[in-house]
Amino acid sequence: MTAPNKTRIYLSPPDIGDLERRYVQEAFDTNWIAPLGPNVDGFEAELAARVGVGHAAALISGTAALHLALRLCGVGPGDEVVVSSLTFVASAAPVVQLGARPIFIDAERASWNLDPALVAEFLETRAQEGRLPRALIVVHLYGQSADLDPLVEICARYGVALIEDAAEALGATYKGRAPGSLGKAGIFSFNGNKIITSSGGGMLVSDDADFIAHARKLATQARDPAPHYEHTELGYNYRMSNVVAGIGRGQLASLDQKVQARRANFAHYQEALGALPGLTFQPEAPWGMHSRWLTCLTIDPQTFGNDREAIRLALEAENIEARPVWKPMHLQPVFAEAEMVGGAVSEDLFERGLCLPSGSSLSAADRERIIAIVGDCARQG
Ligand SMILES: *Cc1c(COP(=O)(O)O)cnc(C)c1O
């Protein structure tokens, strides 16, 4: 069905520069090919500085970072963990893999992120019943921070560990600070489609030095400090390689340009399509800057004249990749048994939501093609 003569436009492809090459070359030239090394140390220090946290541990993935964050917050068998329902499965999978149960909570329309009012109500009820969850994972979706202040306050009041899944939100702000830096711990991802990539990798950040020191130990098979191999607990093999960290370091240096490019994509889409009846972009909440990692919108099929899926297929026919908004976790077969608080907002966003190609290297010509196709799907006359 696709037009084979047209090069595929991807949703969010890697955008690699010369600095990345230099750091990787340096790793080869100095024979630092093993896990750990100067690029790993540099990447950790530079990301911590950029995000405004005390400490960072570079890991093989964002999912590994979340797994360690949960374990270090004491999550284990029989515990419960509150998670944003509207997210990618990696936000919730490590909860189950630690033997705990996720409880999903709905989004609010202002940001498409976790609704603090629903969280407050839920935790109050649970406090009265004497069965509070161990932790709460708030996701900052598509490059926009959730409303963190109320969540920080509520979690502190009830002694629930706040973990920020900022995998999609590097470069965004919340009241001048970086999402990922306000909770007990935050995680970032450098997967191939994120705003910066290391070809695959993640970072765990926290202001707590012991927390990150313990994370580093668990990520390297939990070796105790002894000349022989001594273990008092079990860990994982989760540390980032020095070659991979070189790519990440180079990418981080151009984060601001990448945010600008993605916000420019959004501005062009909005200017060209924003007036079409029935088409609404993900709002930018008043508390911060949206990085526009992805430009997302919702379609009202009655007013627009076509539904979300019709647009997606029209783009796909031209070899252009667009994707539905995340299918909420409470609708996933694997979480059929999980408790859900609310649900109407995330269900609606999934039903009607679409993500457009948003790469920082997207050309103006390609963007115009996309705009023309979406425009053609609107009700004629
Ligand atoms: C990408 C992503 C992750 C996982 O990161 P990986 O590095 O791919 O393991 C977690 N949460 C969200 C919301 C993501 O988008």
Image (spheres, helix red, strand yellow):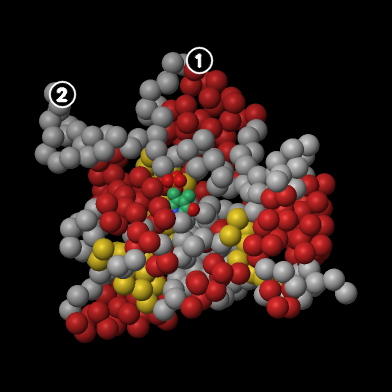
Residue 172 shows in the view? no
Residue, far right: 381
Is 142 situated above or below 298? Answer: above
Residue named by callout 1 = 29
Q: Which residue is mark 2?
A: 227
Image point 60% across, 73% down: which residue? 286
* Residue type, label 2: Pro
Q: Amino acid at mark 1?
A: Asp
In the image, taking residue 206 as reference, residue 210 lies left or right, namely: left
Residue sitting at 41 percent across and 79 percent down?
A: 342
Residue 218 makes an appearance in the image: yes
Q: How far separated are the C-alphas under marks 1 and 2?
A: 29 Å
SS at mark 2 in the image: loop
The local secondary structure at tag 1 comes to helix
- Comparing 209 with 10, the one in front is 10
Quarter occupied by residue 102 = bottom left
Q: Estimate the x, y position of residue 81 in percent, counting from the top left.
A: 29, 65
Q: Is residue 40 above or below residue 173?
A: above
Tell me where residue 283 appears, x and y as whole percent: 63, 71
